Image (cartoon, grey):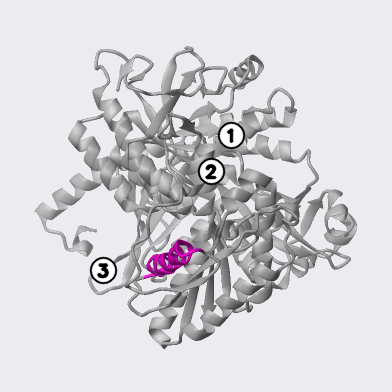
Amino acid sequence: MKADLNLDEGADRLYRALVETSTDVIVMIGVDARVRFVNQAVREILGYEPEELIDRDFRDFVVRTELPGIEAVFEQVIGGERRRRRRVTAVRKDGGEVHLIFNASPLRRGDGETMGVVAIITDISDLVEAEERTREAEGRYRNLVEQLPAVSYIADPGPDGAWSYVSPQLERLLGFSQEEWIADPTLWARRIHPEDRDRVLEEEERETALGVPLASEYRMITKDGRVVWIRDEGVLRAGPGERVQYEGMLTNVTERKSFESQLQFLADHDPLTGLFNRRRFVEELDLEIRLMRRDGHPSSLLMLDLDHLKEVNDTLGHQRGDALLQQTAELLRDRLRETDSVGRLGGDEFAVLLRGSRTNDAASVAQDLLERFRTREQILSPDPVRPTISIGLTSLRRNFTGANEALGAADLAMYESKRTGGDRVAMYSRRLPPRMKGRDSWAEQIRSALDEDRIVLYRQPVVELASGQVHRYELLLRMRTPTGDIVPPDAFLPAAERFDLIQTLDCRAALEAIRLISEAPSDGEPLRLEVNVAAKTIDDPSFLEAVEEALRQTGADPANLIFEASEQVAVADLKRARAFSEQVRELGCGFALDNFGSGFGSFFYLKHLPVHHIKIGGHLVGGLSASRIDREIVRSIVGVAKTLKRQTVGERVNDERTLALVTELGVDCAQGFQLGTPTPVDGRANGHPA
């Protein structure tokens, strides 16, 4: 062997030292599949002395059911493939089984001829055991789901794989009897919606090859021609000497898919008027500006403001004010073309993108909107308040840097219309006077609160149930008005997200948390704080840069700082959420997944996010005393969390009964009014000076 490898004596000693000190098995196998060399690690992993394996067929140590796969890998490497990798179960000398990763590469002579295979074999038994525990916990969750209308099945992989069993719920779901379904193995693939079929079959083929659980959602066509959405979850099973089959469940998720479509609509549209919301309108406007720069076609932008909406709300009630906003949206839809975009930017402000319209054409449209608004059948009649609209107009210019600058120009023109009496159209000009701060919009109030240090922090304790001690605090944002009133978060946080102020608020909270941690007394329990982060904050790279710099300057222990993101944020962009959580972990901070259990794929996200804490959603915890299903779901979540060594927190523990139930179910910590209401930090956090 040394001659074949052309090693000199010094290199040979180094080679043998490296090989013999490796904790992985390193084995050289001849083309006849017999072992030529194996290092000392085989004693620990397989229980054999190295000399006991020499000239033995390596396949003798592989469990029978896995021989075809490992033989295929061996033949592929002998045939010239550079590297192959496969999981394999081997039999130890004492008869026990051990799970391994088999990494094989060709062993060649100097002339390039393959003389065998060199393999590095790693023991992954601990990993397989952990995976099995996770599968068992998920199995309990699936057993719970089987109580709901769903179809259980056992089937061979592939588009024409035989179905050994399908439960009778199939007829209610798809209209086919058990006998019809089992008699025709191709029926499943043929009933998949044509637009989904290729994707679904490719996914199943890939998951089968990898040996990983199947989880897919797709449309199927029922026997009577209806289209239903299906969630298909299955795992590969095979007993000794049995063929590999999927054991799984088909669940009707048509209602959820419809709900998700509605959520997507709500993500892009204002719920009151059905028009584009600010975020979506800004996207449309940004795209139009880029197209205008490229193609040179003219387009114009209108900004509309309902005059005296505040008086309508104050004198006639918000219901009348909402009706007026809806009527205005309907008027805009009726007058404008399908190619135009209309959005409600917030409050009493609307915007219209007139694609392909020059300034004169846009001015005619704006004047027509004024006339229609004046003469329409007033929903407020016969009440004395007669609202009007003010319109600002600007053409889209090549020197606009983006949507925000264009909106700023139209807003300046609109304010000029209001300044000069309203109920008119004003054109944008660089000579217009700067806008005065006359209206108390949420965005302006938040900016003022930030400038005047009126953003305040409250804290709510998270209590460790085993000891009854406060383990940490969740920091909550509040806004103080100039008169000293406290504004709840639901009132201003949506506006903060809409106007891109949430990043500043989250950063302010994080930096204050770091200061509190660094100044806490060192002779007692450390002060641990949770800070919530929104989706836009996760997208902002400057946020974690500021956090890292503050940790460095203050010397605060990062382990005492936990960032918390809702499961909904993770669902929206799993890749983004995972990248953020990994950066947080690199800083030494914790990461918590909030409102866990709100989605159908909660366990999927848990497996793919490196979280330290799982906060079980209040919608589950709050229903524990009344719902056995909620109790079983929480029990399953706790089981999976313990398997993965993650801490669980029950949210919305607001009474003694709920506290007793989360304790009984094994939840680690809890928070809610039963354990402590949110109170202002105001220089002190339960004994820790701020």
In the image, 106 versus 495, the foreground residue is 495
Segment tinted magenta in the rendering: 402-421
Whether residue 156 sits left or right of residue 671 in the image: it is right
Q: Which mark is residue 109?
A: 3
How far apart marks 1 and 2 lie (CA) works out to 9 Å
Numbered disc 3: secondary structure = loop
Residue 512, given in percent of the width and then of the height, sits at 31, 33
In the image, 208 versus 65, the foreground residue is 208
Looking at the rendered structure, the kind of residue marked 2 is Glu
Looking at the rendered structure, the kind of residue marked 3 is Arg
> Which quadrant does the C terminus fall into?
top left
Whether residue 663 sits left or right of residue 71 in the image: it is right
Q: Which of the two marks, 2 or 3, is nearer to us in this view?
A: 2
Q: Which residue is mark 2?
A: 567
Looking at the rendered structure, the kind of residue marked 1 is Gly
Quick one: label 3, few (<14), some, or many (20+) residues within 10 Å? some
Question: Considering only order in the chain, which callout, 2 or 1, is on the residue closer to the N terminus?
Answer: 2
How far apart marks 2 and 3 lie (CA) works out to 55 Å
Question: Considering only order in the chain, which callout, 3 or 1, is on the residue closer to the N terminus?
Answer: 3
Q: Is residue 396 visible?
A: yes
Quick one: label 2, few (<14), some, or many (20+) residues within 10 Å? many
How far apart marks 1 and 3 lie (CA) works out to 62 Å
> Which quadrant does the N terminus fall into?
bottom left
Asked if the residues shown at circle 1 and circle 2 are in contact, with their CB atoms under 8 angstroms apart, the answer is yes
Query: What residue is drawn where x is 76% and y is 41%?
Result: 146
Query: What residue is drawn where x is 49% and y is 42%?
Result: 492
Numbered disc 1: secondary structure = loop
Q: Which residue is mark 1?
A: 617
Does the magenta portion include 535?
no
Query: What secondary structure characterizes most of the magenta part?
Result: helix
